[in-house]
Amino acid sequence: MIDNTVIENARNGDNLAFLQVHKSVEGLVYSTIKKSGLNVNDETKQAGYIATWETVKRYDSTKKVAFSTYFYWWLKKELREIIKKPSLPYITVDNEDLECITNKTISNERIENLDSISRRDHEIVRMKIEGYRLREISSKFSLSKERIRQIANNSLRRFVL
């Protein structure tokens, strides 16, 4: 648990305090990157620093929310931005789905212009690319997680470059 005075010092421009804050959430950065199916590289590490900075800027200790909880939200947001980039080097949001197309490149332009799949399937693919979990998508469409996984895999398999 990070002390609120360290967070406040980081907010006021103390670089050492910022690094101390980031060091306290570094383990969460790496585990979240891996759970998101991304590789730990400069881009994903940078997402961790950006998330730390956004959290430091906006964190309000009076709201009774743990710093790490708030940080996790910002980190997921930054990682979703990486996943949504126009040309993705790979798509694996988590290790329980999209296993068929790992290490392929999919253009978001092609995903957005899919005429050959239904609107529902298109929405499922979009949500997977944005990093939603199978559980979240399945509850939205009232389908099983396995069916969502199948729809995403089958739809994406057609459009892998």
Image (cartoon, rainbow, N blue to C red):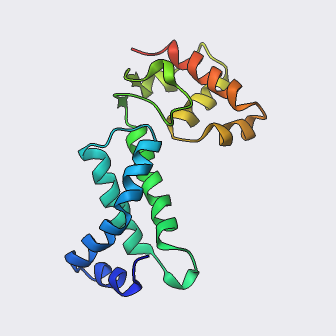
Q: How many marks?
A: 0
Image position of 99 (left or right of 116): left
Image position of 156 (left or right of 3): right
Q: Position of residue 89 (x, y in %)?
A: 34, 28
Q: Position of residue 157 (x, y in %)?
A: 51, 15
Whether residue 114 is visible: no
The residue positioned 64% from the left and 21% from the top of the image is 151
The residue positioned 71% from the left and 36% from the top of the image is 138
Query: Which sits in the foreground, 144 or 58?
Result: 144
The residue positioned 63% from the left and 36% from the top of the image is 134
Asked if residue 129 is positioned above or below residue 20 in the image, the reply reads: above
Q: Quadrant of residue 153?
A: top right
Image quarter hosting the N terminus: bottom left
Image position of 86 (left or right of 43): right
The residue positioned 62% from the left and 16% from the top of the image is 117
Image quarter hosting the C terminus: top left
Asked if residue 116 is positioned above or below residue 47 in the image, the reply reads: above
Q: Position of residue 139 (x, y in %)?
A: 74, 40
Question: Looking at the image, which residue sits at the far right?
Answer: 142
Whether residue 69 is visible: yes
Q: Position of residue 74 (x, y in %)?
A: 45, 59
